[in-house]
Image: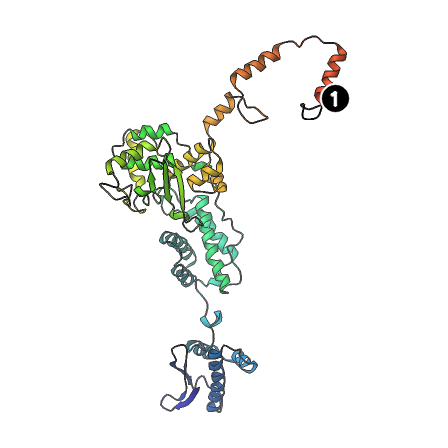
Amino acid sequence: MASLSRDTKRNGFRISFYSGPDKRKRVLWLGMKLLKGRDPEAQARRIHDHVEHLIGITESGGRVDKATQQWLQTIGLDLRKRLVNVGLIEPTADDLGPVTLGCFLYEYVASRKDVKDSTRATYRKTVNALVSYFGADRRLDSITAGDAEMWRVEQATNGNQRDRDRTEMEENSVRRRVGLARQFFRHAVKRKLIAENPFDGLPAAVRGNAKRQQFIPAETIYSALEHAACPQLRAVIGLSRFAGIRVPSEIVRLTWQDVDLEAGRLTIHAPKTEHHEDSGLRFCPIFPELRPFLQAIYDAANPGIDCPLSAPVITRWRSADQNIGTAFRKLLKQAGIKPWPKLFHNLRASRQTELLAEFPVKDVCEWIGNSQPVAMKHYAMATDDSFQRAINEPICCSTGCSIPDSQAASEAHAQNEEPPETKASEGSRDLVMSKSLGPAGLEPATNEL
């Protein structure tokens, strides 16, 4: 199976054998520095015997015998690496040497071929933040929980590389980075490169940020659109505000075969949720407020005649990388309207807030494309209109509905009238009966209590 030969020119021994699926020839070199003692040839023969056993185990899939197991525990690191290189034993963390932070993170991101390019780009931002703080050559197993906590503080105070006016990073952005760092190091734990995850215990759950939430009334959008000459831009803003479509990811995927004006239905393809059970496919009504915007570009495109139904609805922006927000901000500036935070997200959230006041929450979440917990945490907003209605419109406590004005006036008039005079015995009896008996049902009436 394996041959042992002496090379006098190089002053050592060579073990040659064929292994692997391709039966490729492999050579294990044993130099004199490796063969210590008075009889190097005897040592080479002992190594040869164990190598033959490992070759047989590799081909048969059996278990290594006790003698070879004990021998593997006594050999030096140099010989172990040579056995790993010829494929006779599996490498351990010690065989590979200390793993550095940069090497591990770059390898991890490159291996995640199951995620989208945009997700991988998000990974790289956190990787760069980790490498910039700790250094690429930092040993992975040397990063402690205290180091991780100080990295989080650094991200919160100096992690903002995008805004020139401030270095502080939003709390949710910090939490997302911590969550990704925890994910990376969890993988290292699974690979047994480190014993524990230093990022465990740090807050990573994203919370709703009320400071950046803002309800955008429909009147504000109509005022802005008076200055919009481009029907494509008008349609994008209309789809975002009156259908809650994500911009730009869902906008660029919308084709004319997804727009059924006759049935009043939009078919929306959501890249963000295409890994879910529904493949990111949902249906949304074409609301009356939205229809004029779609009708205008439908008449201009004349789909099915002048262009195929597979053609995109929005032709001005064809990639999610294009910044539609730039055109929207210019429009708001022309209209004299101050831009709000999270430009398109707040349009989407405003629409969901309106719909939740009119339709069942399950239906609204199906149309908008999010879950009920996410809708309540990141989208639904308290509005001034609801507050004013609560002040001015009486609510029927038993049913939860508003009391009609006529009924409210009638009840107020009845409260001002004096009750008719009755005999004490009759009054007491009526009071007892009203408190003790419910409304008449199927049982016959009786005078006994």
Quadrant where the image shows the C terminus: top right
**Residue 80 in the image: x percent, y percent?**
47, 77
**Residue 390 in the image: x percent, y percent?**
51, 24
Is residue 307 shown to the viewer in this render? yes
**Residue 423 in the image: x percent, y percent?**
74, 9
The residue tagged with tag 1: helix, strand or loop?
loop
Q: Is residue 256 above or below residue 178?
A: above
In the displayed structure image, the side of residue 203 where residue 280 appears, left or right: left
Q: Residue furthest left?
A: 306
Quadrant where the image shows the N terminus: bottom left
Q: Is residue 195 above or below residue 45?
A: above
Q: Is residue 409 above or below residue 15?
A: above
Q: Nearer the viewer, residue 303 or 413?
A: 303
Residue at the image point whose x is 52% and y is 56% from the top: 145
Among the 4 quarters of the image, the one containing residue 265: top left
**Residue 238 in the image: x percent, y percent?**
34, 34
Q: Nearer the viewer, residue 80 or 151?
A: 80
Total marks drawn?
A: 1
Q: Nearer the viewer, residue 379 or 422?
A: 422
Residue at the image point whose x is 33% and y is 45% from the top: 253
In the displayed structure image, the side of residue 370 where residue 251 appears, left or right: left
Is residue 341 shown to the viewer in this render? no
In the displayed structure image, the side of residue 438 where residue 279 appears, left or right: left
Q: Is residue 428 above or below residue 105?
A: above
Instruction: Give the colouring mode of the picture.
Output: rainbow
Can you identify the residue that label 1 sits on?
446
Crowding at dot 1, Cα within 10 Å, few <14 / some 14-19 / many 20+, comes out as: few
Q: Label 1 amino acid?
A: Thr
